[in-house]
């Protein structure tokens, strides 16, 4: 595509690495060091308008505005948890599409949970994101901009961890996921250590195999939620394509290849997957593997009317796993009072909008 045809549609700076931006500037006859300045404003100083980049001349700023945009989405709603101070943002990407990002301040950590798609194909029973189906993949800039806006909520604009656990299945948007990770990790962009970045998947086996070959030090988290095909399959339709045994075999190979532990997420739903029997099966499945199980008491959504086990039942489940030497933690969902299960805020907003449309 010629520069002339690209000029017709400004390019989102956030979709480009520093080198890619330099190439575009070079093609437009602009000095390469300007790319460093632009990145410094965006990633270092949270400035998202060319007009506010005061070390660029007015002429240059006008030229940049012809060529590029900085694709920062509009904040539609912001909900702050009274309990744990986590903040959930609903961000409007364009007239049709919105996504969620969550900022979670903890004692020593500032974690941001981001979305990788608009909607999701995988229809997990307990998840609000999958209920309305899949719309589209996010571009790199649309993922990075969530990080930038959520980071700006942090008192010193510093964040420690990123988790791909918002709306969408990151492995279903693999090329954009990898480029985003590299930009998050890059010293020229957000400079977040790979080990501080967690990719969470519903268990897409071919992509787990691909990630093992990438040489990235990111954390891998697998949504397991059931110790056998019948329990997991009832909660996660993806289990038909990638059943439990094959998934665990792939995980073992991943661990062997990368030397890195895997985290298995296990949402505990009373009467569904939280009995002693299921705890014992899960323990046998994972015994001896370099991994950790994260037990998450269910945070109910309207579409899946179940409840979490009691505190005592959660502890009992954990103790059974520990008896087999399986490392286990219990995580209570952040932001329970602000619809923080992924996709809940977007889903509530869409229902409100539909109601308005009907009026
Ligand atoms: S849990 Fe993840 S993969 Fe499953 S429907 Fe929700 S977003 Fe999609």
Image: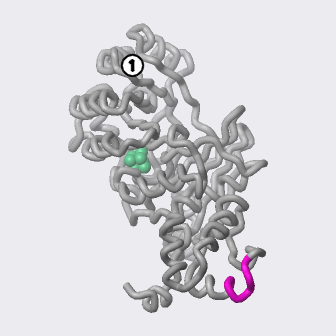
Q: Which residue is drawn at the image coordinates 74% and 83% (left, top)?
A: 57
Q: State the count of labels.
A: 1
Residue named by callout 1:
275
- Position of residue 67 measured from the top left corner of the image (x, y, whole percent): 56, 84
Q: Is residue 141 visible?
A: no
- Residue 284 falls in image quadrant: top left
Q: Which residue is drawn at the image coordinates 31% and 26% (left, top)?
A: 227
Q: Nearer the viewer, residue 346 or 263?
A: 263
Establish if 328 lies above or below 95: above
Residues in magenta? Answer: 56-61
Q: Nearer the viewer, residue 212 or 266?
A: 212
Establish if 203 lies above or below 57: above
Judge from the rendering whether residue 29 lies leftward or rightward of residue 325; answer left or right. Answer: right
- Position of residue 179 measured from the top left corner of the image (x, y, whole percent): 44, 57
| Magenta stretch encompasses residue 295 | no
Q: Which residue is drawn at the image coordinates 60% and 71% (left, top)?
A: 35
Hey, which residue is sitting farthest top in the picture?
A: 323
Screen quadrant of the C terminus? bottom right
As helix, strand or loop, the secondary structure at mark 1 comes to: loop
Question: Around disc 1, counting alpha carbons within 10 Å, would you say few (fewer than 14), some (14 to 19), or many (20 or more)?
Answer: some
Q: Nearer the viewer, residue 48 or 333?
A: 48
Screen quadrant of the N terminus? bottom left
Q: Which residue is drawn at the image coordinates 55% and 85% (left, top)?
A: 29
């Amino acid at each position: 595509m010629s520069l002339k045809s690209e000029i017709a549609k400004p390019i989102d700076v956030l979709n480009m690495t520093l080198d890619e931006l330099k190439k575009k500037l070079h093609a437009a006859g602009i000095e390469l060091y300007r790319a460093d300045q632009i990145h410094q404003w965006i990633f270092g100083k949270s400035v998202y308008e060319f007009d506010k980049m005061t070390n660029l001349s007015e002429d240059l700023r006008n030229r940049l505005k012809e060529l590029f945009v900085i694709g920062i989405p509009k904040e539609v709603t912001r909900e702050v948890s009274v309990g744990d101070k986590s903040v959930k943002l609903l961000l409007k990407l364009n007239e049709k599409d919105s996504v969620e990002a969550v900022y979670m301040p903890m004692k020593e950590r500032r974690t941001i949970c981001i979305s990788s798609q608009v909607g999701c194909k995988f229809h997990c029973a307990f998840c609000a994101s999958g209920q309305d189906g899949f719309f589209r993949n996010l571009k790199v800039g649309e993922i990075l901009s969530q990080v930038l806006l959520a980071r700006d909520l942090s008192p010193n604009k510093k964040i420690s961890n990123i988790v791909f656990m918002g709306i969408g299945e990151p492995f279903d948007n693999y090329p954009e996921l990898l480029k985003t990770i590299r930009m998050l990790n890059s010293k020229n962009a957000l400079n977040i250590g790979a080990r501080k970045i967690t990719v969470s998947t519903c268990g897409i086996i071919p992509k787990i195999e691909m990630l093992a070959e990438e040489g990235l030090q990111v954390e891998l988290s697998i949504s397991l939620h059931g110790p056998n095909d019948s329990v997991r399959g009832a909660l996660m339709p993806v289990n038909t394509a990638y059943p439990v045994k094959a998934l665990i075999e792939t995980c073992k190979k991943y661990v062997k290849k990368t030397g890195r532990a895997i985290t298995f997420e296990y949402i505990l739903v009373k009467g569904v997957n939280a009995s002693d029997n299921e705890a014992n099966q899960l323990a046998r499945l994972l015994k001896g593997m370099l991994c950790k199980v994260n037990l998450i008491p269910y945070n109910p959504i309207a579409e899946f009317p179940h409840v979490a086990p009691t505190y005592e039942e959660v502890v009992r489940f954990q103790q059974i796993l520990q008896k087999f030497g399986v490392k286990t933690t219990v995580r209570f969902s952040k932001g329970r009072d602000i619809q923080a299960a992924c996709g809940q805020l977007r889903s509530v907003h869409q229902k409100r909008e539909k109601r308005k449309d009907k009026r």
